[in-house]
Image (cartoon, coloured by chain):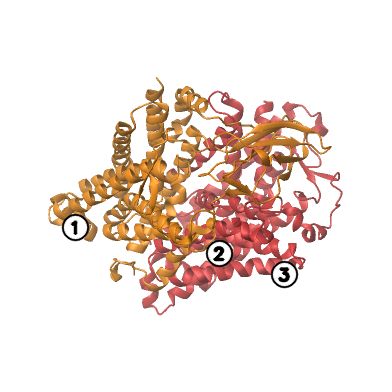
Amino acid sequence: MDTIISILTAMLSEAIAPTTAGLAIAVIGLNIHFGYTGLLNFGQAGFMLLGAYGFAITIKSGQPMWLGIFVGLGAAMVFALILGAPTLKLRGDYLAIVTISAAEIIRFTGRLSVLQDFTGGALGIRSANYRGPFVDLSPFSKDPSDQFTLMPINYTDFGGSNAVRVAALLVAAALLVGAIVVFRRGRAALAESGEKRTPTSSRVIISALSLGAFIALFFAIPLSFPQTGNDGWWLRLVGWSLVVICSLLVLLLVRSPWGRLLRGVREDEDAMRSLGKNVFAIKMQALVIGGVLGALGGMIYVLPSTVQPDSLGRQVTFLAFTALLLGGAATIFGPLLGSILFFSLRIGIREAGDAYIPNSIMNSQQADQFAFIVVGVALMLLVIFRPQGILGDKRELRINV
Amino acid sequence: MAPAAWRAGLLSLLLAPMLAVLAGTLLAPAASASVAQTVSVSCLPQPDQQGCIAGTLGGRNDPVEGADLTLVDEAGTEGDTVTTGEDGKFAFTITEPGAYTVRLDEETLSDDFELLGPAEVSVNVNLGANAAAFFEIRPDNFEAGGSSRGERIVQGVANGLKLGLLLALASLGLSLIYGTTGLSNFAHAEQVTLGGVVAYGLVNVGGMNLWLGIVVTVLICGATGYLQDRVLWQPLRRRGLGLTQMVIVTIGMALAAQYAFQYFIGASNQKVVVRDFGTTTIGPITVTNQSWIAMGVSIVMIALVGFVLLRTRIGQATRAVSDNPALAAASGIDVDRIIRLVWTASAALAGLAGVFYALAVSNGIRWDTGMQILLLLFAAVTLGGLGTAFGAFIGSIIIGLIVELASPLGAPGDLKYAVALVILILLLLVRPQGILGKAGRVG
């Protein structure tokens, strides 16, 4: 029982980790590229790395934080323009090859020992060099011993036995299942009646059930971190608020006439051209906006640890794709749900492999590699058998380049 | 029993990585056998018990052997002293977190190398974590010393041709698959790695004769291509899965394959053969004997592929499918059979390229060897013109030369791969269809 709870704890803290929030923002950007516009951007990690470098190097050299954010986002914008100019007029796989190459060029350049004074070479820049201004903004206590626990009232106040925790976990699971059932019924009813919006009553029920599940989950597995610090609640609050803001932004964008243009380009470029739309410009706008979101995600991603070029290599792009496809491309909540589920499941697989399979067969390192093998196979199976992911609509995903 | 177990392991690795656990049990003795052959000190961090300070002296291709390093703790007390193995690696195990200094004994550093940075490096390490200690070391003859710029350019041309020929061997298949099915196969580089890994398993672990091992490797790799098309790609084509989706499937496969390789052979460089072949000098060029062989075999194989494509009925049919699959099918060509053949041949060629790359270029195989040349392969194929087999050959030679000539001509050594990619992006601005491609194909 203790092993299961420790695995669940590891999964839950990964699910709310700032790095997961950073990746979720990058996945939201990727959703604009791939989900809505059908652009095959295999260099999202490059956008993240550029954002992180712009942010970290500017602050390290003594400039204010707003300038760092501006430089990071600006760098991503310029990068998108440079990449898009030669490739967006060509067939889609050219964009894929060029973005993946360009992301590698950034990583190679960041590793250069000649640039050690700026980028820190292969070791990267430690967050102590750039997180200062961000930490100073925190309204919470800056004393590392001041911990905050989510939930403040938890199973320890009710005897602290495993039985209480298991009961709370079962309640959380039941509430989640309830939310899913209501959601699916709502979907089915929508498909029958042909209406567009889910009725408010079922939205309220789903929200209430999810909130209940959230409370029960953290009641059973309370997590405590310092209030500020380099990896505390302040960073989590900012990171996840940004995720919500970016999701809302995407919601507004794709419901606008411009969003219809994006989907039009995805479905049939030639038809859009014959309607007199500038397809190149639309694709470029999508590439820039998604890339800027990637850079923003990169900044959140590096705040707890280091800007290390190899930690934002090709793998991260592929993880982002898997998270996007798991949650559902071309949906608003898909990237959010996909990121939280995917990154915590990966940790869960790793921890479970480590805990239950004897070391003679699989040691800790191999358990981590095994988790990646599962990710790769999951990506293949998802694309083949459920391209719409959890939330998506199959009709929306016949993307062809 | 080791080779049998190894082969069983490899098969499951490609067909169903989910079976990895099972194969791991079979493979365990084979893996430990290989560890005994190389001297290397390793350390595994354990949460709350021990942490590791590790590093490598010298580059992957020119590691520093036999240098002494000493660990000094915060109080200045000297701890363990370790000597680097033949792979240049060292590791210290610590049981107390804190700041440590790793001191390199310059006396023990071989005369062929010079130390650029300080001889002491400070690292912070926590329990359950790995910390890296970096020393800036490079071969003494790295620049100026020994050879003139002209000689290095000539040598660079030779190495560039070698790399180009091996890239051509691999990229021919990539280009043929693209031509016949329209698929950009991002897992093609893993086929290259697979060649090296199978050869390592057969020759180094299994003790098979090298040349026989190469032949068997090529056969096994070809079989993986055949099976892939049969089990995966043909059913997907029948289902009408879009090309974009198929590209993502290849990405998933590449990811799974890379970590499966790492699962089995670990994260370090594994040599296919341990013995030294010596070098031969012809004119101003000195390269290892296995490089001469690799170049010779590559030329023969590329010529063979060219001959088959141009002069045989099968080749004609392949070119017809590349041009227009529907028309080819209408004129009585069995398109599925041709595509199956292309997958088999491509995987076999990639496997051959992988063996020779491990023998002649990277001096061993790593789980990410293929991943590192994937972009060079794509650059070569795009440069020559996507889907044209002869374009892939020309593009590969050009990319090989660019990569190997970048350093003698003044680019920083770490950037030699990036230079090739920059040229790819610039070319797309000017002539997106590549050198031999037709303009109509890219719209």
Q: Can the viewer see residue A43 in this picture?
A: no
Q: Classify residue A126 as left or right of residue A356.
A: right
Q: Give the residue pinned by disc 3.
A: A67
Q: Nearer the viewer, residue B144 or A269?
A: B144
Task: State which chain is coloured red.
Answer: A
Image height of B17 relative to B185, above or below: above
Question: Which SS class for mark 3?
Answer: helix
In-image side of A58 versus A388 (left or right) = right
Quadrant holding the C terminus of chain A: bottom left
Q: Residue most toward the bottom? A: A276
> Disc 1 designates what residue?
B320
Q: Nearer the viewer, residue B122 or B375?
A: B122
Residue A396 position in % (x across, y down): 44, 59
Q: Tell whether A228 sits left or right of B202.
A: right
Instruction: Look at discs 2 and 1 and give the one toward the viewer.
Output: 1
- Could you give the CA–CA distance between mark 1 and mark 3, rounded to whole angstroms? 57 Å
The secondary structure type at the circle numbered 2 is helix
Which residue corresponds to the image point at 39% horizontal and 49% vertical from the top-left?
A: B286
Q: Both on one chain, marks 3 and 2?
A: yes
Q: Name the one closer to the observer, A151 or B416.
A: B416
Q: Are marks 2 and 1 in contact (CB under 8 Å)?
A: no
- Location of mark 2 (residue): A290
